């Protein structure tokens, strides 16, 4: 082979390698563009899932004061101040999935579960306080979504606030009862909760007694069970098959379920499984309604990141102290001064 031939072969080989590299580069660029487009679509989809209500604007300044202000974090720093969030489980009757899971007909909804989640400063510990839905309260006048206001109502069940005035009245009634400023509002419906549990692969809970509740379609023997979304929802709703059949027994099961879900989430490194992370995020946002301060994927992500140091063992679950209502043995009222001491610890 002559030197010219060798040089020609090398030149053609280099040319082929160059073409191959350019082709690989174009393919990689196209794949990256497709990935970016998919990520953009995923973000848009998850972000558009979230529904919101402008509670701050609707309620104005006639509310409990905010906690003593802490320095505002920089744009890159995560928030770390104390926070109070009213979390409601809604028995929304809209949509076939909610109806199938027990939401009833299509007319209206109630707050089936109410919890005040208090995050301590630093966000490494938290207190979850359940408010029995059968608690008799003075429901304040609330702005109606369609205009006008509701009348003040005495000796009304706590969960009636959501039924007559939606999230705005639920927040105002919770603040009136507790004297605690609700910094944020989060509501999840039946379908959203069930989908979240399924996306996590189910949840394992241990019950201390047999449960037989035809109303929630749940029958469990005492012991440890791995539940899918529908059965976990049934456990959160059951009341007739345990204890005295009151809301207080159900709250105990809900606290068990909250702890189990926190442990389930902590046990899964979702960041290493993008597909599962997306399924969980889609489930969380699909049935979600928030205040306007949490109504974007960015806001919810920052809240979640600020809780990375919070473990299930540092979450305390309690029920607002109550006693039987003198006017109705099937209802309860706040037990004082114990209830006031509890709320004061969260201000």
Image (spheres, helix red, strand yellow):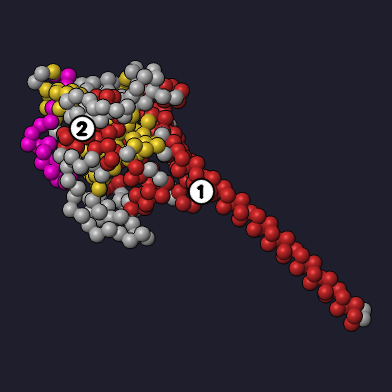
Classify residue 218 as left or right of residue 164: right
Residue 214: percent from left, percent from top: 34, 17
Residue density around tag 2, few if under 14, some if 14–19, many if 20 or more, within 10 Å: many
Residue 320 among those drawn in magenta: no
Residue, far left: 337
Label number found at residue 165: none
Q: Which residue is mark 2?
A: 173
Q: Quadrant of residue 49?
A: top left
The secondary structure type at the circle numbered 1 is helix
Residue 276 seen in render: no
Q: Quadrant of residue 176?
A: top left
Magenta-colored span: 329-347
Q: Position of residue 187 (x, y in %)?
A: 34, 35
Corner quadrant of residue 288: top left
* 262 lies above or below 335: below
User: Which label number is shown at residue 274?
Assistant: 1
Residue 173 image point, x, y percent: 20, 32
Q: Secondary structure beneath disc 2?
A: helix
In the rendered image, residue 338 lying in the magenta stretch gets the answer yes
Q: Left or right of 165: which side holds 268? A: right
């Amino acid at each position: 082979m002559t030197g010219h031939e060798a040089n020609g072969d090398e030149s053609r080989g280099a040319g082929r390698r160059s073409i191959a590299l350019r082709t690989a580069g174009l393919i990689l660029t196209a794949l990256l563009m497709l990935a970016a487009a998919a990520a953009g679509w995923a973000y848009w989809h998850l972000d558009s899932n979230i529904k919101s209500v402008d509670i701050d604007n609707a309620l104005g300044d006639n509310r409990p004061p905010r906690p003593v202000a802490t320095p505002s974090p920089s744009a890159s720093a995560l928030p770390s101040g104390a926070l109070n969030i009213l979390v409601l489980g809604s028995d929304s009757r809209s949509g076939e999935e909610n109806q199938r899971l027990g939401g009833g007909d299509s007319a209206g909804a109630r707050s089936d579960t109410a919890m005040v989640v208090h995050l301590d400063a630093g966000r490494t510990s938290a207190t979850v306080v359940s408010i029995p839905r059968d608690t008799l309260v003075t429901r304040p006048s609330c702005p109606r979504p369609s205009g006008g206001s509701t009348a003040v109502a005495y000796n009304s069940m706590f969960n009636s606030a959501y039924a007559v005035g939606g999230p705005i009245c639920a927040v105002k009634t919770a603040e009136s009862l507790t004297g605690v400023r609700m910094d944020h509002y989060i509501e999840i419906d039946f379908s959203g909760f069930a989908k979240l549990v399924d996306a996590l692969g189910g949840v394992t809970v241990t019950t201390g007694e047999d449960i037989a509740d035809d109303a929630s379609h749940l029958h469990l023997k005492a012991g440890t069970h791995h539940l899918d979304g529908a059965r976990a929802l049934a456990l959160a709703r059951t009341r007739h098959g345990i204890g005295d059949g009151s809301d207080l027994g159900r709250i105990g099961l809900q606290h068990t379920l909250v702890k189990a879900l926190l442990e389930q989430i902590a046990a899964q490194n979702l960041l290493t499984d993008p597909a599962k992370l997306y399924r969980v995020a889609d489930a969380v946002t699909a049935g979600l309604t928030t205040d306007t301060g949490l109504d974007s994927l960015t806001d919810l992500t920052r809240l979640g990141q600020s809780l990375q140091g919070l473990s299930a063992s540092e979450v305390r679950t309690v029920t607002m102290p109550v006693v039987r209502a003198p006017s109705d043995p099937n209802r309860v009222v706040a037990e004082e001064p114990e209830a006031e001491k509890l709320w004061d610890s969260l201000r």
